[in-house]
Each structure stands twice: as C-alpha cells, then as structure tokens.
Image (tube, rainbow, N blue to C red):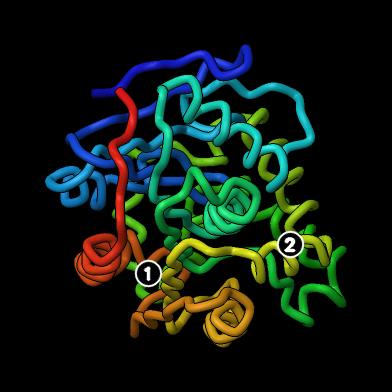
Amino acid sequence: MEGYVDVDGVKVNYRAEGSGSAVILIHSNGLSLGQWKYNVGPFSKYYRVYAPDLPGFGLSDKPDDEYGVEYYVNFLRSFMDALRIPMAALVGSSLGGAVAAAFAARYPDRVTGVVMADPTGLVPDGISRNKELYNAFLGLMIRSRRLYCRPMFYDSSAMKALEGTQLVTDSKESRDAFMKNCKAILRYDPGYINALMSITAPTLIIWGQDDLLLPAEDAQKYKELIPGSKVKIIGYCGHMPNVEKHGEFNSAVLDFLAGIKHNPGGR
C-alpha cells in the first residue's frame, strides 16, 4: 500500500506492507522510498514495514526548511504519532542511519532496535579539511543522475538498480534540500557523538567494504561509541548495501531483528 499522511502540515508519501511489529526504513539524503525496493518485500514477510519519502524528497512535500538530522528526528517522531506507531525498529541508510541513531538516543522508549547502513555523522578528515571543494563536487554531482549514482556503488553496473527511483536530480526543491542536509552533515557535532554513546537499543552497523563516500573504517568507530553494537562488513560493496548487495543486507537485518524484542506497531 502506498499513500499519504499529514505530518505537522507536511504531506508525506509513504509505503506500508506486512503485519506485526513495526520496522521503519529511513532513506539516504537525495533518494526516496524507492531506495528500499529490494528490501520492503523480504522484511514485510515478518514485520509491518513503513518506508516514507522524507520531506524534501520523492513525492512528499518539499518545504523551504533547514533540514538536517535534527529536523528529521522531529519528523520521525511526528510520523510515528500520525500513524499510531508506538515503537519501531529503525533501519537507516547514510543520513537515514544518523537520523535513526539520534532518534534512538532521544526516544529510547520508542525504539526496539537500530540498523545503520554506512551512516553519516563522523566527518572524515579529508572532507573536513576541504569542505568548499567537497560542496562544489556535490553541487555538480546532483545535476546528473549518472554523476549522482556512480559514487554510491562499487560496481557501476549496479546503478541500473536505481532506475525508476526518484532522486535529488528530479527537482530544484530536492536539490536545495540535499545541499542543506549536506551542510549539516559536514558540520562536526559533538552532541551527535554523545548521543551515540547513550543509545541503549540493540544496534547493528552495516558497511560496504568499498564505500567511496564514507570509509568502512568508520564502522569500528561507531562500534566503539555505541554500547553493545555489532558490525557487519559487506565485501565488494559501496555506499548502498541495501541495493548493491541486497540479499546479504536483507539476511543480516532479518537475523538481527529476529534476535530483539518487538512490540506491535501502528496501522
């Protein structure tokens, strides 16, 4: 089922499938719920799966807001309230992973587990020293579907998996939202580091071994910051393991979810 829900005055497109305890999929910066096309089906065999288009992207409204992790944490809380989801496991990709972690730290009573796939939040030194150059690269990248998709994958042939998926390249409003998110992503936030250390929910960190955007070494840094967290490295894989290696990704997530306690979720 795909439909719309009003979230604090923002019209949000989302997909929901399956029954049972709730799992919410939070897509990457610049993508849409189409990112999860290879994951919703397998997950919905066991869970009630929700995949929203985050505000600024896909078919959801694109308000002229600042965006960033804090914005989407607040959005996620209101999204869960609107659909009457008391608790959920969160599966986030890239920016979505950082949102899932920050939400779990702030609202531990509403999170049963967290999966973070190649999450943003730990700004690599090279990017931190060359923000202007990196921003210029991002500004160019989002003008072309090919330029945007290529750095996401280890194997360039995997780009075809995003055909038909709405991307940042599709509208000026989405490009604006993307760059605002990037501005927040590239700003070191000690509060985020502290939040990671306060997470109590079971947490799985998944990383593509050959991520061209964020180094796989960061997985170990996250593991050291999040108490009791586990790491899964997927070989021959770039920034989007849920797409490029979706079979391995799905198995890892389902194994993880099967081992945690869930409560029923939403409508």
Q: Is 40 above or below relative to 141?
A: above
Q: Looking at the rendering, in which quadrant would you find the C terminus?
A: top left
At x 43%, y 84%, the residue is 209
Residue underneath mark 2: 192
At x 12%, y 46%, the residue is 45
At x 33%, y 28%, the residue is 266
Q: Nearer the viewer, mark 2 or mark 1?
A: 2
User: Left or right: where does residue 218 sit relative to residue 117?
Assistant: right
Tell me where residue 115 sits by quadrant.
bottom left
| Residue 137: image location, x then y, percent | 72, 61
| Residue 56: image location, x then y, percent | 61, 31
Residue type indicated by callout 2: Tyr
Q: Is 88 above or below relative to 198?
A: above
Q: Residues within 10 Å of mark 2 (few under 14, many from 20)?
A: some
User: Left or right: where does residue 95 sit relative to residue 191?
Assistant: left
- Pick whichever of labels 2 and 1 is earlier in the sequence: 1
Residue underneath mark 1: 156
At x 35%, y 74%, the residue is 155
Q: Looking at the rendering, in which quadrant would you find the N terminus?
A: top left
Most foreground residue, 189 or 82: 82
User: Left or right: where does residue 67 sit relative to residue 265?
Assistant: right
Most foreground residue, 170 or 11: 11
Label 2 sits on a secondary structure element that is helix
Residue type indicated by callout 1: Ser
